Image (tube, rainbow, N blue to C red):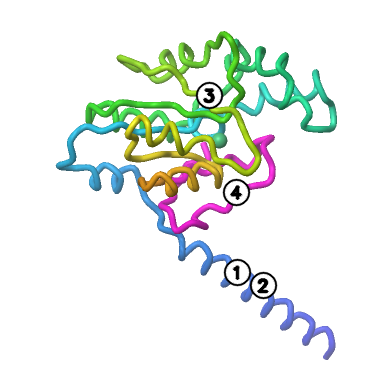
Amino acid sequence: MYKRIAVIMAIISAVLVNCACVEQEENISWVTLKDIARSLENQPPMNVGFDIDDTVLFSSPGYYYGRQKYSPGNKAFTIMEEFWNEMNNGLDKFSIPKECARKLIELHKKRGDSIYFITARTKTKTESVTELLVKTFKLENPQKVIFTGFSLGENLKIKPIKENKIKIFYGDADSDIEAALEAGIRAIRIMRAVNSTNKSMPQNGSFGEEVLVNSEY
Ligand SMILES: [Mg+2]
């Protein structure tokens, strides 16, 4: 008897948990590549912006390496000049371009849009990230990557978004979506891969922004 009740309870709770997830997912404004293309029909060429890490590149390998080398077990490497020099000057050879980014960039290239990359990576004297992105995504007339650095309490991406008159900004982090919304432009969320070394996972759709389907890879 008790066993049967336990089984029934287990089934009910499983159903409830499932419903909660479905409800959460249903509240998200999912968009496909086609939806984005359609929404831009009849619109003249514009400037669009992309975050880099976990948006256009799965760059965790470089960050994983940097952490082992400079500060095993903690995040101190992210404030070390030596790490950023390495990261911005070659470690992206281990970064895997995201398929969703390839497709998005193709869409925008076809429309004649200008593509900007804005990253919170620390700026270094030299960098090879621009060159790598140009090669990877076959960009013509490329803009140099904008390195904003990171500041607690201030979103440093708002300014370059405004200055470059960017109309759509794609990013995986809550701070990317926040920057776009603060700048008064359209924000589209790219999902961070679950095996990214950048934990804790962002809250996709939490700002009511559009979220690109299948954008984890
Ligand atoms: Mg990112």
What is the three-letter code of the residue carrying label 2?
Ala
**Residue at image coords 43%, 53%:** 209
Q: Position of residue 31 (x, y in %)?
A: 37, 51
Query: Badge 2 local density, few (<14 within 10 Å), some, or many (20+)?
Result: few
User: Which is more foreground, mark 4 or mark 3?
Assistant: 3
| Label drawn at residue 202 | 4
What distance separates the C-alpha of mark 3 from that of mark 2? 46 Å
| Label drawn at residue 18 | 1
The extreme top residue here reads 126
Read off the magenta span. Answer: 188-217
Task: Identify residue for label 2.
Answer: 14
Task: Identify residue for label 3.
Answer: 147
Q: Please, what secondary structure does the residue beneath circle 4 have?
A: loop
Mark 4 CB in 8 Å range of ligand 1? no
Mark 2 CB in 8 Å range of ligand 1? no
Whether tag 3 and tag 2 are in contact, CB under 8 A, the answer is no
